[in-house]
Image (cartoon, rainbow, N blue to C red):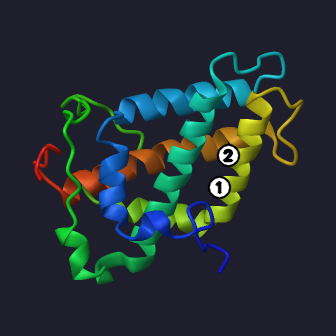
Amino acid sequence: MDNYPVFSAGDYIFNPYDQLYAAFHSKTLMSYKADLDKWIRFACSSDKVWSGKPDVLVALFKDVCIITECCWAVHVQGPNYPENWDHTIAGYTRKRAKEPGADYKYKLPELMVAHPENYLKDFFNNHTVNDIFDVLFECLYTAFGHEEPYPYSFDEITNVAGECTCLLEAAYLIQKKKYPGRDGREK
């Protein structure tokens, strides 16, 4: 039960593959990674406070938590996911976000780019979902001006952020592999 999803209380794991697709439909992988990096820099800097709109950072926190939770559900189910997960297709009227270019360099180890689900095993062997949510919440709180991300050190935060960056890449690759060629305008 240490890894039971608590952020969405199960709402977003009804079909985690489709939810991952939705996360990357209108926001690019590169944008998520850049925003996470910016957020962590604010959290690890005692003299800087988030100066943008608070809802932007809170939305990023929510998105990263939901992506983490969906990855956990994919990891736990493995190849035993329900068949009806394949049949859920959300309709989108806007164009899908830009894909990474062919020369894009993933931070994931090269072997895991071909099989991103293998990263999930490593990630969730080292972290519980609740631990990740707790670290990210402290980073959120600190980026808004709290003095320090107690009880985490900046080294711990930087390490978790690097692993979350790889988790974002794995999530992107998993949904891309699950729905090849899907442009999001199907009904």
Q: Residue at x 22, y 36 (%)?
A: 96
Where is residue 126? Give x, y as percent: 61, 64
> Which residue in the structure is indicated by mark 1?
132
Q: Residue at x 49, y 42 (%)?
A: 165
Nearer-the-camera pick, 66 or 163: 66
The amino acid type, in three-letter code, at marker 2 is Leu
Crowd around label 1: few <14 · some 14–19 · many ≥20 (10 Å): many
Where is residue 166? Give x, y as percent: 46, 46
Q: CA distance from mark 1 to mark 2?
A: 6 Å
Query: Looking at the image, can residue 93 be seen?
Result: yes
Secondary structure beneath label 2 = helix
Q: Residue at x 70, y 21 (%)?
A: 50
Q: Residue 136 — which label?
A: 2
Query: Looking at the image, can residue 127 be seen?
Result: no
Q: Are marks 1 and 2 in contact (CB under 8 Å)?
A: yes
Nearer-the-camera pick, 59 or 73: 59
Seen in the picture, residue 63 relative to 69 is either above or below; the reply is: above
Q: Is residue 122 left or right of residue 114?
A: right
Where is residue 92? Give x, y as percent: 21, 44
